Image (tube, grey):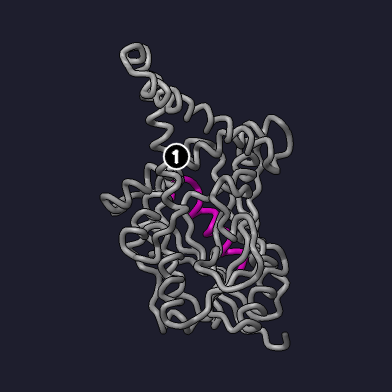
Amino acid sequence: MTDFPGVSYVMPVLNEAEYLREAVQSILSQEYEGDKELVLALGPSSDTTNAVAEQLASEDSRIILVDNPKGRTPNALNLAIGKSSHPIIMRVDAHSELPPEYTRRGVETLFRVGAHDVGGLMDAKGRTPIQRAIAAAYHSKFGFGGPAYHSGAPEGEAESAYLGIFRREVFDKVGLYNEDMWRAQDWELCMRIRQAGYKVWFDPELKVGYYPRDNFKALIRQSYASGTWRGEIARRYPEGKSLRHDLPPLLLLGVTAGLAATLAAPFVKGKLPKTARAGLNLLQAAPAVYAGATVAAGIASNAENLGEKLLASVAFKSIHLPWAAGYVKGRVFGAAGTLDRGRVK
């Protein structure tokens, strides 16, 4: 590539004091010959995030700060895009670290395949045993059902793109992020890009280091919010529905019914006919079968040792069951007002 268009990185920031400096350093040290700027959209953090951001901006004139009083991701992205100036827009995350060649590869792919949005792999990693176990669950197809950006796929056109590397003009064509979509706004934007006849592309050579939540309570809250907004997508858009999204609610129904059957069995089992008792026994087995499956998936995961593999089995439950509950809520009642309480403190 002989032409290196300027790149504007846009980052929503909220309660990221522990991760922000490393994320920013990974961006500004990119091995890319074109001009770079980084726009940080600062939400109302309850930790020292904004002080860290101000210090970073004082150290490097390429860092631009913009206030995001609502603290929501789509608002942050739109504010940051509005303050940016270069022809390539790259969405980045304060929980992520870009490998040195990420920008160059992303821009090359954007023009090589004629795409307007390109994304790659979320390479989850961890600093603590629990975070590493959660990262292992992210990498497993048992964890998220195998989306390309988690577990990989061949290069090609995609439904959505992780983070996103955009030609600036696509926002003039299809509009900015939908500020009503507090989560899943990337999927909704990609839908509009595809509907307008432009290409969304997955490149597995683009890998972004990502630090997931570092405790199970935060993961449960994140999973519930993600499921709720995925249910909202299925509620709003016909192409947002998928059979694989209906499987977790069926799993939740089976586990819940199994627990209820276990509680009821001592009182009703002797009064039931033989066939009904057999059905009750099957229901009672459902939670144990699921628990066994999570342990087996944890053992098979890429977690580093037995302890972390067992923690990964807990991570699977913390992803599946809250996501399923959220999805049902989003499909039936909508997602309006649902926040990721694992991030908001």
Tell me if residue 22 can be seen.
Answer: no
Tell me if residue 280 can be seen.
Answer: yes
Is 117 placed left or right of 283 in the picture? right
Secondary structure at numbered mark 1: helix
Q: Is residue 122 above or below residue 288?
A: below
Q: Nearer the viewer, residue 161 or 250?
A: 250
Is 146 placed left or right of 306 in the picture? left
Q: Is residue 319 above or below residue 35?
A: above
- Dot 1 alpha-carbon crowd within 10 angstroms: few under 14, some 14 to 19, many 20 or more: some
Q: Nearer the viewer, residue 75 or 152?
A: 152
Quarter of the image with the C terminus is top left
Q: Is residue 200 magenta?
A: no
Q: Where is residue 203 in the image (x, y as percent from the top left)?
A: 64, 69
Quarter of the image with the N terminus is bottom right
Q: In this view, does 279 lie above or below 111?
A: above
Magenta segment: 45-60
Is 238 placed left or right of 91 in the picture? left
Q: Where is residue 130 in the image (x, y as percent from the top left)?
A: 61, 36
For the stretch drawn in magenta, the main secondary structure is: helix
Q: Mark 1: which amino acid?
A: Leu
